[in-house]
Image: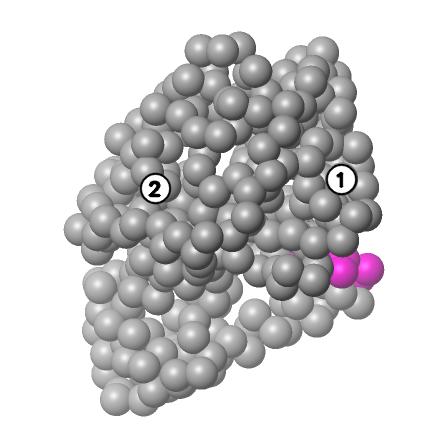
Amino acid sequence: MQKKLLLNRIRELSHPLQPQKVGHRVHLDGIDNIKCVTFDFYGTIFISSAESIDLNTNHEEDNNHLFKKAIKACGLTIEKKEAGEKGYKKYMQNFKNYDDNKKKQGITYPEPDVRNILYDVLIQLKSKGIIKGEVTREAAALCVLELELRTNAVWPMPDLYSQLKSLKKSGYRLGIISNSQFYSPISFEALVGTNIAGAGFTEKLLKWSYRHGVKKPSLDIYRLFIDELPAYNLKAEEVLYVGNDLFKDVIPAKKLGMKTALFVGDRRSIRHKKSDLIRKQMPDIIIDELSQIEECVT
């Protein structure tokens, strides 16, 4: 029941976006022996206006207002006007506490499930009489989604489904390695019109950071992906990893033996300077259209 609600809210609060081209140079070359194409999510197969799961720390007053709206949207009642300010501050503090604790445990790039962060915040606000109502895990999930959709508009890249369908038809396995939250695969289903499996992705080749407690550029999340490959008679060098971030996507994937494609088709998601593209960091190909992948691997 809740998934249907989340799907509907994503559709209601989303609107079409188009990539913003910048004329970045492309490098299209043939890559032999590719059997699996794996993608980053935000900024690569999904346009992201913010390319972040965080609230905008430069506009605290707006964030306070958005936090209050999200609380109301998940069926809770505001009892005190400082609900937005107190909630937002506690939300950010809980993120920091989680991050600090995990780093002390040796996890360099930790990733929480934000539903747990929000749930704790809502419980604390209710205990202080700042909000009223039944605080459930479902309410926390909806609150997270309401915050995300209001701070980071997303939309599928043009012709995404047809490109995935074409790759699958050509015999390539499809995967995802993404810094993401629970709403990422739900957003795919809501806006593409089919779920992840229906688009041709292999379940065990989906590595969403929130499920594993670690995020890119950590090599650990890439290793989790590589550990799955033998079950499909695949090797790392037979995987093309496609991402928009030179440092979080291309360099870690290269270190573990994967072939790499740097996606530069949207100004909002380009994270490097021209000077960063030096020999040892160069991807195998640089593309600005997803359709160029199949040109290079066939």
- In the rendered structure, the answer to whether residue 66 lies left or right of residue 265 reads left
Which disc is residue 196 wearing? none
Q: Is residue 197 magenta?
A: no
- Color style of the picture: one colour
14, 250: nearer the viewer = 250
Within-10-Å neighbours for mark 1: few <14, some 14–19, many 20+: many
Q: Position of residue 243 (x, y in %)?
A: 57, 43
Determine if the magenta segment contains residue 109: yes
> Magenta segment range?
105-110
Question: In the shown orientation, is residue 119 left or right of residue 189?
Answer: right
Which quadrant of the figure contains the C terminus? top right
| Left-right relation of 79 to 282 | left
Classed neighbour count for the residue bearing mark 2: other residues with Cα under 10 Å, few (<14), some (14–19), many (≥20): many
Could you tell me residue 216's position as x and y percent? 66, 51
SS for dot 2: strand
Instruction: Name the residue: 70% across, 59% down.
Output: 276
Pick the residue in front: 64 or 46.
46
Is the magenta region chiefly helix, strand or loop? Answer: loop
- In this view, 268 is above or below 178: below
Q: Is residue 6 visible?
A: yes
Image quadrant containing the N terminus: top left
Q: Are marks 2 and 1 in contact (CB under 8 Å)?
A: no
Does any portion of residue 205 appear in the rendered image?
no
Residue pictured at 35% horizontal, 28% vertical: 161
What residue does disc 2 label? 156
Type of amino acid under label 1: Lys
Q: Residue furthest left?
A: 12
**Which residue is identified by label 1?**
254
